[in-house]
Amino acid sequence: MSQRSRFNVVRGPFGGKALVVGEISGIKIGLDRTWVIVLALVVYSLRANFLAEHPDWSGGLALGSALTTSLLFFTSILLHELGHSLVSNALGLPVRSITLFIFGGVAALSREPDRPRDEFLIAIAGPAVSAVLAVLFTAAAGFIPGDPLAFQVLGVICAWIGTINFILVVFNAIPGFPLDGGRVFRSFIWAVSGSYTAATRVASVGGGLFAALLISVGLYGSFAGGRPSLNGLWPILLGLFLLRTAVVSYIMLPRMYEARTLARAKAQALARHRFESAQRAAAAEAMAGARGAEEISREEHLGEDGLRDPAV
Ligand SMILES: [Zn+2]
């Protein structure tokens, strides 16, 4: 595999190759295979919802509205991730890609932030975009008249997108890593304690607890009725995904950070060593040059009259 093609491949959160559909500010936009599942589920449930709430809508209108709402929903997630990514790029931590997958979107940061302040700014940028979208779409829904039908449909779609973005903000306010709220939480502990490792561990425990809560809610939803059902499947799957990420973050991130800090210290020591050696070499060269110049001048002096005292 050539360097170039390896660089062009975008991998989803599960390691699979994502379909690259575009590029914004040098950031590749990828669709993971699992995204198709969530797209189908969202379209299906929105269509059912629209038909239940608006019995006068035709099946085609409900489906078309569901598709439009779904695409705007995923565009909202993409804009949320772009918020994180553009701030990250501006802070010198380049983002290679954004991938939409079954549980939303993920921006692939080239590495973890170096400072709590950077972590905070990158983490808050996504929910800030969602908050703006929530306000804009909810306001638009309030202004659009309910008549005629075309306006009604537009109003319903705007209200949904407003609500979905509001849910994104609330969900990402939960102080559990890897959610945005968990990253903000981590940046605070990091700033106060000065320890990246301690901050990551505390925030990851928060993430693990929230994941356990999601799984419990899902299990309750699936088994509370006496007969097992698929009602709680979504929270269970999302909870398992978050739990896995929280556990991996708890173990791996401090290790990676320490390795990077060590590598950086080594590189600095090496650079210092090289600088000092270069300085020594330059000094030696200057000295040799001075000696050489002295010798030349002696020769010149000698050449001038051949009688001059060579010690001058
Ligand atoms: Zn986010």
Image (spheres, rainbow, N blue to C red):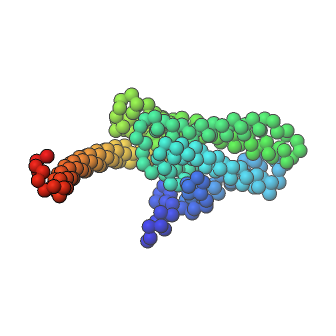
User: In front: 216, or 149?
Assistant: 149
Residue 212 shows up from this direction: no
The image position of residue 233, as x and y in percent, is 54, 50
Q: Is residue 264 left or right of residue 246?
A: left
169 lies above or below 36 = above
- Residue 174 placed where, x, y %? 51, 35
Between 273 and 176, the one nearer to me in the picture: 273
In the image, residue 36 above or below residue 164: below
- Percent position (x, y) of residue 79? 62, 46
In the rendered structure, the answer to whether residue 257 lies left or right of residue 39 reads: left
Q: Residue placed at 34% from the left, 38% from the top?
A: 197
- Farthest bottom residue in view: 1
Q: In front here: 229 or 96?
A: 96
Determine which quarter of the picture holds residue 152: top right
Q: How many marks?
A: 0
Which quadrant does the N terminus fall into?
A: bottom left
Q: Compared to 234, does 171 lie above or below?
A: above
Residue 9, how many percent across, how many down?
A: 50, 63
